[in-house]
Each structure stands twice: as structure tokens, then as C-alpha cells.
Amino acid sequence: MNLIKRSPYHHKFVAAGATFVDRLGFPAPMSFTSTEREHRATREAVGVFDVYYQVAVEVAGSDAASFLQAVVVADAAAMPVHRALYTSLCAESGGMIDDLTCFRLALDRYWLFPTPARVDAVLAALESARAGHEVVVTGLGYRNAYLSIQGPRSRALLATLTDADLSTPALPYYAFTFARVAEVPGVLLSRTGYSGELGYEIFYPVEYAEHVWDRVFDAGARFGVEPCGLGALRTLRLEKKYVLFGLDANETTTPLEAGLAWTVKFDKQRFAGKAALAGQRASGPARRLVQIELPTLDLVPPTGARIVVEGETVGSVTSADRGYTVGKALALGYVASAYASAGREIELAWADTKVRGRVHVRPIYDPEGVRLRT
């Protein structure tokens, strides 16, 4: 591995004893202590994640709203300023080019946050659709540092660093504001995250990175703050049935198959992939993404493990890991729609191993999303 890129926090990671994996050429922390400890810190107190390789794409200009309205499946034009939404960018076939988060900074300015490995694909798709629109599409690269501060005590921690009103009425789920945080002006502070808990993400110029890291961990000591790696991010998102593009979705899957039909606004006049998705909605997807609960924490199936019903292979596992909060190993995978019903008993098979599992259509952890909206 030729890991020549560095997060601005890399020296902090080394000092904290992180173990590293390659993430798009960055040595990214897999864990600092253990994945289980970091998972539980996020569920019970505060976990802090660096995703510096998560870069923004800016869409700006007088036609920014109408342009995005024509390319993403959600209603970007109706979204108020200082709100965010989760959406997908699709090909005309209905296949997902990427799922992404969209922030509206002004009437004529948006930031999109694609999957890190899909930034180039998203930029190419936006550029190819830009003709006839007064809009500029810009990849912002690594000019901003980023911390995701997640967990039930994240609000209390951040309240010691900012005068911004962090209450749910003032800053509800999927809203953001600009505020002074740890003396840094103009920080984008958003009520978003990938953990399934109350949480915030903060974006600020990279030159403040070390200062903000130090202030967050100094202030967080009394709240049980822990630095967390990719391992915990993976186990947390699996408990919530959150899709990871590249594993649980790709250009051959549609939002309807991936359990994201709620993001598709068919009442819009048009958007890329609308005709194909409308056809699939009418006929019903042939396959659907489900969550599978295994009997214990101990046996985690590999990607590609077969999903079997009465001796017939009806799908395969796309990702799996331990769900430490629920005390069970969990998998995501696509099954033929006839078998995508809650409570269905299935079998997972790989190599010489077979294990029973139970299908969940909704997330096994906090299915109503109460904790992240509190």
C-alpha cells in the first residue's frame, strides 16, 4: 500500500495508538482501542469520527435548484435553506450512480457529499447533465476538515464549545447552521451522522483541524468521549440498516430495491431515472435489501454468502459484522422479493458453514429513529 495522503489528524491517530487501513490512499483508523468499545461509546456516550476523505461537491448558480431537481430523486428545490436531505443520483436506467447527502447553503448554492469512492463518478454525471443550466459544479477537495461527533451526550459536549442553540426545535434532525465552535468562526454545524444516534457533523477550514480536535477531546473527557475508527462506523451502520454504496448498492441496484423508495419523489416533473423507477414501482422490484439477524455475535458471514430458503438460493450477503448493541451478528443482503418479509427464517451458507437467520425489513436497532431525532 502506498499511503501517501494524510488526514490533518494523522499524528493524533498515531499518538492514540490507532491501527490503520487503506481508505482511498489515506491511512484511516480502523480502531483505537477495540471496535466494540468504540461502538458502545457512541451508543452510550460520545464517539468522534474523522472522515477527512469525505469531500464536498458544490453546485452553485441561478439554476442550481432546477438543475439538482432534474438530477437527484429527492425534492431539492423545495428544501429550505439550512436544511439537508438524503437522496440518490441515478442513471436513466434507474441504477444508482451514488447515494449522497445534499445541504442547501443558500437559494442558489448547495453542497453535496457523495460516497468518497464515488466523487469522480458524481462529478462526471453532474457535468454531463449541466448543459443548458446556469450552474457551476466544483469539487471542493480537501480544503475543509471534518469531525462527526455522535452519541447521546454529543449535544452536552458541543454545548460547552458553542453558543449556538443545539436544541431540537432550533436545530432538528437534518438541519444545519453556521456557528462559532471552539472559537473557530463560520463552522458548518449539522445535525447529521451515520451512527443512528443523536449526533452532529462539523466542517471548518483545515488550518483549524488540530485546534478543534484538542478542544473537542478536552471538553469531552467528562462526557466519556472516545476517538472511533471505521470498524465502529461499520457496526453502527449495520444495526441501523444503513446502505453503504459499493457494498449494499451499486450501479445495478435501484433506490426501490435498496429500501430507499422513501427518498424518491415521483410527483416531480422529471429526474434522471424517473421512467425506469416508475416502471419498477408499478411492477414491484424483483429483489429487496433486507437485514438478517443471526443467533449470536460469534458467526459473521462473509460478503457473498448465499441466502437459502428450503434449499434454494434466493439472494446473497452484501455486508455483515457484529451488532454489539443488539448482541447478534447482522448481515445485509438482497433476496427475491417473495422472501423479503419480516420474521422469515432463512439460512446463510458459505464454505462448509450453514447458520440460521431471521429477516428484518426495518432496522433491528431503534426502528422508529427516535434516538437520532431526540
Image (cartoon, grey):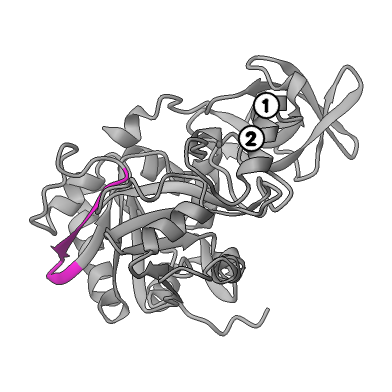
Could you give the CA–CA distance between mark 2 and mark 1, rounded to whole angstroms?
6 Å
Residue 341, percent across and down? 67, 17
**Is residue 114 among what the camera can see?**
yes
The range drawn in magenta is 174-186
Give left or right: position of 289 versus 327: right
Quick one: 131 or 38, which is closer to the camera?
131
Say which quadrant the C terminus sits in: top left
**Is residue 34 among what the camera can see?**
no
User: Which numbered tag is attached to residue 24?
Assistant: none
Residue 199, percent across and down? 31, 46
Quick one: 193 or 102, which is closer to the camera?
102
Disc 1 target residue = 282
Q: 38 above or below 295?
A: below
Q: Secondary structure at mark 2?
A: helix
Magenta-highlighted stretch: main secondary structure? strand
Quick one: 166 or 262, which is closer to the camera?
262
Looking at the rendering, which quadrant does residue 102 occupy? bottom left
User: Which numbered tag is attached to residue 278?
Assistant: 2
Residues marked 2 and 1 touching at CB (< 8 Å): yes
Give left or right: position of 136 versus 180: right
Q: Secondary structure at mark 1?
A: helix
**Which residue sits at x=56%, y=85%?**
4
Q: Label 1 crowding class (10 Å Cα cut-off): few <14, some 14-19, many 20+?
A: few
Determine the residue located farthest toward the front in the rendered image: 132
**Which residue sits at x=60%, y=71%?**
124
Residue type at tag 1: Ala
Q: Label 2 crowding class (10 Å Cα cut-off): few <14, some 14-19, many 20+?
A: some
Give left or right: position of 211 versus 340: left
Residue 64, percent across and down? 38, 63
Say which quadrant the N terminus sits in: bottom right
**Which residue sits at x=15%, y=71%?**
185
